[in-house]
Amino acid sequence: MKDDLPFLFRQLTHGVYVIGVSGGGKDNAFTAAWVMQVSFSPPMIALSINPGHSSYRMLVESRAFSINVLPANRKDLAKHFGLPAETDKLAGVAWRRGETGVPLLNEAMAVFECEYSHECEAGDHRLVIGRVVAGSVLNPDEFPMNYRETGDMDASSGLYPDGFT
Ligand SMILES: Cc1cc2nc3c(=O)[nH]c(=O)nc-3n(C[C@H](O)[C@H](O)[C@H](O)COP(=O)(O)O)c2cc1C
């Protein structure tokens, strides 16, 4: 049990978000759990993103991204946006363009818009720090989704090493 890294790391509490990006004349969005506030003034949020995602290139190009907070009852959206961008994932989903030009989901319980500030390496991910420039609470009575409730939707249990080295 002590070396069961997927189970161990599921003890950390994360929300579940849809990150909106635009670049190369296209819009896209993907599910992310590794999101956290990192500064009050200026308000800043960090996102850990796999640089292999098509969304990463779009984010770096557009220098902006949105964070759409998913309510607990929208696992369908978490699953949908967790798929690779082989199709237009935003087709059939109600969204609008934010002040920074990135997609905002109408069914999010809250939205943030961030301007890209800087990034650094974090193992197999990149830690992108964004400065929050806009945001609003759309549905204050809803409860946010907890990453743990998504089970292995992201297939992450197969991504950990066998143990600590
Ligand atoms: C619940 C859940 C949480 C996820 N969290 C992250 C995350 O924090 N960072 C990340 O880079 N990918 C995360 N993913 C994986 C991406 O959503 C997935 O690889 C997606 O296909 C990338 O989209 P894109 O190809 O449109 O860029 C998560 C997926 C799910 C289902």
Image (tube, rainbow, N blue to C red):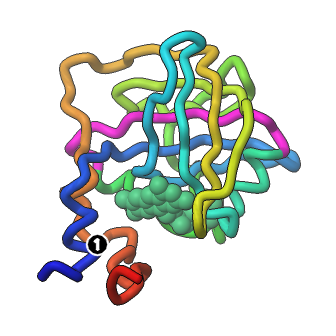
Q: Residue furthest left?
A: 1
Residue of label 1: 152
Query: Is residue 68 inside the magenta stretch?
Result: yes
110 with respect to 55 (left or right): left
> Which image quarter holds the N terminus?
bottom left
86 with respect to 45 (left or right): right
What residue lies at 54% left-to-right and 44% top-to-bottom? 47
Eyeballing the image, is 42 above or below 163? above
**Kind of element beneath mark 1:** loop
26 with respect to 153 (left or right): right
> Which image quarter holds the C terminus?
bottom left
The disc labelled 1 sits on which kind of residue?
Answer: Asp
Q: Nearer the viewer, residue 9 or 152?
A: 9
What residue lies at 71% left-to-right and 26% top-to-bottom? 115
Q: x, y (%) of residue 110?
A: 40, 24
What residue lies at 22% left-to-right and 80% top-to-bottom? 4
Q: Nearer the viewer, residue 52 or 40?
A: 40
Please indicate, yes or no, whether residue 80 appears anywhere in the rendered image. no
Q: Nearer the viewer, residue 91 or 144?
A: 144
Q: x, y (%) of residue 92?
A: 52, 49
Q: Which residues are magenta?
A: 61-74
Label 1 residue near ligand 1, CB within 8 Å: no
Q: x, y (%) of residue 89?
A: 58, 56
> Crowding near pointer 1: few (<14 within 10 Å), some, many (20+)?
few
56 with respect to 163 (left or right): right
Q: Quadrant of residue 37?
A: top left
Q: Nearer the viewer, residue 40 or 2?
A: 2
